[in-house]
Amino acid sequence: MHVKTMSAYMIIHGDQKKFSFQSDTWSGAFGWGTAETTLPGDILERRKEVMVECKAIKAEQDLEFFFFSVCDIGDPKHGQLFCCGDLEVELAEAVFGGKVDDNGILDLGSQVSRKKQFIPPVSKVLAGGWTPSPPSLAHSLSQKSDDYGEVYVDPLAGCCGTVKRRNFKAAVNAVIAANRLASGLLGRGCSHGKVGHDHKTA
């Protein structure tokens, strides 16, 4: 299945693993999803929905942090790391160096292997006593308290249905916005009270 036809849920959960860690200062579990592709741009252009799904996984699996890497397995190989929160940004820069960009993505250069190039250095930094700053830890905890919606199967998407996330918050906000617009129209003397009603002027 092409990534363009896959939901963010399917892209990230397709190859996602959970790891545990422990040091004298911090312990818990973290997750790492990865997608190997020759068309990384198809995922990068959906950055916002991918970031939301990363936060959702962190909350639902009660993880301390979550990373998602997009690995271009063409020639040359190239990896990019999605950092869904302040904690992930701090840790990624501590482990891999460089600077996470304004979109929350860190360029990993030619590194593409989660098993050989990502997990070992992260585990080493954590074992060495690295801990997140209080503000980034607080930010991560606040992300885990959010409601990211229900996971369901859309039977009309794809050839055999597609697993998606129903974002209740967005749906509720849309209803509120529609109601406010309708109220505004009524306040201007619209007897129909319908969004999108055609108002003709004399």
Image (tube, grey):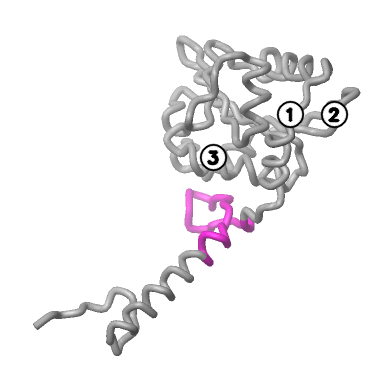
Circle 1/circle 2 CB separation < 8 Å: yes
Dot 2 corresponds to which residue?
A: 26
In the rendered structure, the answer to whether residue 36 lies left or right of residue 29 reads left
| Nearer-the-camera pick, 151 or 144 | 144
Q: Which residues are magenta?
A: 149-172
In the rendered structure, the answer to whether residue 190 lies left or right of residue 199 reads right
Q: Earlier in the sequence, mark 1 or mark 2?
A: 2
Crowdedness near tag 3: few (<14), some (14–19) or many (≥20) residues, C-alpha within 10 Å: many
* Disc 2, SS: loop
Q: Tell me the kind of residue under disc 2.
A: Trp
Where residue 132 is drawn, which disc sits there?
1
Q: Residue at x 85, y 30 (%)?
A: 27
Q: Quadrant of the C terminus?
A: bottom left
The reply to whether the magenta stretch includes residue 99 is no
Dot 3 corresponds to which residue?
A: 50
* Disc 3, SS: helix
Return the residue found at the far bottom.
191
Mark 3 or 1, closer to the camera: 1
Residue 21: quadrant of the picture: top right
Measured in 3D between alpha carbons, the distance from the residue under mark 3 to the one under mark 2, in whole angstroms, is: 27 Å
